[in-house]
Image (cartoon, rainbow, N blue to C red):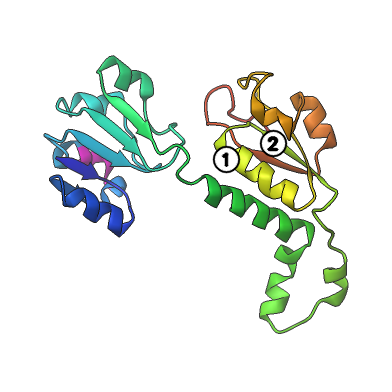
Amino acid sequence: MIIITEFMDEAAVQSLQDRFDVRYDPGLADRQSDIATDAKGTRALIVRNRTRVTADLLDQLPDLVCVGRLGVGLDNIDTDACAERGVAVYPATGANSASVAEYVITAALMLVRRSWFMTPQMIAGEWPRQAAGAGSELAGKTLGLIGFGLIARDLAGLAAGLGMDVIAHDPFVADDDPGWRDVEQTDIDALLARADVISLHVPLTDATFHLID
């Protein structure tokens, strides 16, 4: 049996239901204390980021074989406890890379053009001409990426297409990685000093918690 504790695309749910015994309860994440009882006997658990997969929960689900994460962050899953119990963890690596990259570009455009701050006036039917003229372009600006995985690389391509210079810091990416051909590798202090726009693309761990003050 597969238990899905948070919202999931209907077509994807149906695809699983066509092949497996599936219980889809997108509200179960809000009833954390009920998960152990409702998921008893399940072999697979599919979650997003609100379901806490703890050692205690794992102990109450002895038949569990794997945990699927609809997303890439694993801070809500005790991966060490999963490993100790032989439970595999499968993040949806790459599934939302394009979506996140597009969102970052959209947010950056809204901020540098000051559109975000003018929205209430526009909704009210006003035309804040002076405020609109205070914005600027992304072209010619520098984008600093902290973390250089799949999402950051997709973002780098979009930013370059808008005429931005892209620099990045990621101590876990080898110096000879092909990705550095189009993006300048730098240390974090230089990145913070040079970048006009900074975007973080790192997992939430003890090492990255409060990385930016």
What amino acid type should be assigned to the residue bearing mark 1?
Ile
Q: Is residue 33 magenta?
A: yes
Quadrant placement of the C terminus: top right
Q: Is residue 21 left or right of residue 14?
A: left
Element under disc 1:
helix
Spatial separation of the CA atoms under disc 2 and disc 1: 10 Å
Q: Is residue 12 above or below residue 85?
A: below
Residue in the picture at 62% in, 22% down: 173
Q: Which residues are magenta?
A: 31-35
Residue 148: image x %, image y %? 63, 32
Give the mark nearer the N terminus: 2 vs 1.
2
What amino acid type should be assigned to the residue bearing mark 2?
Leu
Task: Give the residue pinned by disc 2.
Answer: 145
Residue 17 appearing in the image: yes
| Closer to the camera in the image, 159 or 196 | 159
Q: Quadrant of residue 118?
A: bottom right
Q: Quadrant of residue 55?
A: top left
Q: Is residue 136 left or right of residue 108?
A: right
Task: Give the residue pinned by disc 1.
Answer: 151
Packing grade of label 2 (10 A; few <14, some 14-19, many >=20) is many
